[in-house]
Amino acid sequence: MPVFNRLLAPWALAAACLGLSASEYTHLASELHAIWPAKHRVGVVCDAAAQRQELDILSLALGPEAKLLVIDAHSTLELGTAVNALRAHQADFVVLLPGDRLLCEGSPLRVELARNLANFGIPCMGTTAKSVEDGALFAIGSDTDNRPRIHTQPLGSLRAELPPPREPSL
């Protein structure tokens, strides 16, 4: 199972220069920087080839200081290895991509991944309300009206200090 440390793809840099936005992940990145300013190792478990565009957009939103740890997973058998790889590479948190084939929203595998990571103190984040139902500590994105949706009963050993809700910046 390959682990990739992502750099911005050339098209993502071109998109940034043209003013195209990584808006779905911008609010999430802003919240992550506000909550944990010193944490920059962001994990993602997904089919890396199929999610290349999403990964580039996420990388763009997170900024140059972030280290994106992409765990390429194609089957249920690789989820345990993915958790171990994220622990070995000391991921600070994991972003759940809403459109991944294996870890799609509402998937029991996604819930299992979030629970296993939480047991090791690695929180998951998302951009949709469904992400919170699937075990993410919080989610923020257009689906949540760009306001944090916080999990009322965090999984595993997660006890994070989250800021109080605030008005989204425009």
Image (cartoon, helix red, strand yellow):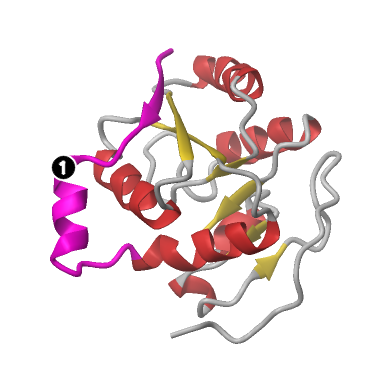
Nearer to the camera, 11 or 65: 65
Q: Is residue 123 magenta?
A: no
The answer to whether residue 76 is above or below residue 18 is: above
Residue marked by disc 1: 10
| Residue 40 spot, x, y in % from top left | 57, 42
Nearer to the camera, 39 or 162: 39
The segment highlighted magenta reads 1-22
Nearer to the camera, 31 or 80: 31
Q: Please, what is the three-letter code of the amino acid marked with disc 1? A: Pro
The answer to whether residue 35 is above or below residue 86 is: below
At 51% across and 21% down in the image, what residue appears? 76
At 68% across and 53% down in the image, what residue appears? 36
Q: Is residue 8 magenta?
A: yes
Q: How many marks?
A: 1
Quadrant hosting residue 111: top right
Q: Is residue 97 left or right of residue 86?
A: left
Quadrant hosting residue 144: bottom right
Nearer to the camera, 118 or 59: 59
| Residue 21 spot, x, y in % from top left | 27, 67
The C terminus is located in which quarter?
Answer: bottom left
